Image (cartoon, rainbow, N blue to C red):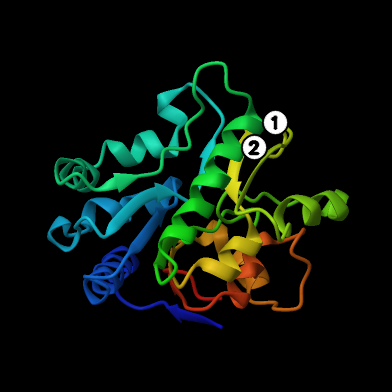
Amino acid sequence: MVDVHTGGSPLDEAADTLNGLIAETQGKDVLLLFSGGSAMALVDRLHPDHIDLHHTLSVLDERYTKDEGASNFTALTRTSFFKEANDRKVLSIDPRPKDMETLQDAAKRFDLALKHWHITHQDGIVIATMGIGEDGHTSGVLPMPEDEDSFNGFFLNTSKCAVGYRTTPQKNPYTDRITTTLTYLVRHVDHAVVYATGTQKREALGHMREEDGNLAEIPARILNKMKDVRLFTDVKF
């Protein structure tokens, strides 16, 4: 069930909630997964004093590109929060493609790194920031209503934490993508703070609340199946 907050300042309230979740889990092993786009604005509002060697930082999804201006992880590394955490020797998982690494190889490396974290931190907690796009996408999972079988094969794959896939430029200018799966979000994300603002997202937010709707049409519907989701928005829907 999604806990929706529509009053006050969505960015301030989302950041306060995220800081509170991190503070509450101090002393425990925590994996922090950050979304790109507008949700990255939350990161610079985090208190680095809450971060220690129990934490691991990464992103929820990445673009397969060498363009640093398009990379979610690069955007994360440029925040004051990440720089402070890095100075404290906090570990991170970097899914950016390496030289000569194919899309599938980069996705496999990210998948294995997430699996390794869960194996070595069996009581660990995962906290994620998330957004919702105008098309109803969330994380790096874009709609694929024209090919539901492929969508399910990629994103509902029970053996994968992360996958690589290619979409069309008509759907998104970043066609080659690496993302955590919808199965991963349901199974492993303990707390999600969702930041989605702007009237242009009203339709997507409304469709998101349709719990029995098709995930391939509106991937953000997965939020209804996750453990603890708190959505902050300025949109009434």
- The quadrant in which the N terminus is found is bottom right
The amino acid type found where label 1 is placed reads Pro
Residue 36 location, x and y as percent?
44, 46
* Looking at the image, residue 91 lies above or below residue 188: above
Residue 71 location, x and y as percent?
45, 33
Which element carries disc 2, helix, strand or loop? loop
In the picture provided, is 211 more to the left or to the right than 29?
Answer: right
The residue wearing badge 2 is 172
- Disc 2 vs disc 1: Cβ atoms closer than 8 Å? yes
Residue at x-position 34% and y-position 68%: 10
Tell me if residue 174 can be seen: no
Q: Which numbered marker is on residue 156?
A: none
The amino acid type found where label 2 is placed reads Asn
What is the quadrant of residue 178 in the picture? top right
In the picture provided, is 220 more to the left or to the right than 123?
Answer: right
What is the quadrant of residue 89 in the picture? top left
The residue wearing badge 1 is 169
* Looking at the image, residue 209 lies above or below residue 162: below
State how many labels appear: 2
Residue 141 location, x and y as percent?
64, 51
Q: Nearer the viewer, residue 201 or 220?
A: 220
Residue at x-position 15% and y-position 45%: 84
Task: Tell me if mark 2 has few (under 14), some (14-19) or many (20+) residues whose alpha carbon lies within 10 angstroms of its own.
Answer: few
Residue at x-position 68% and y-position 70%: 207
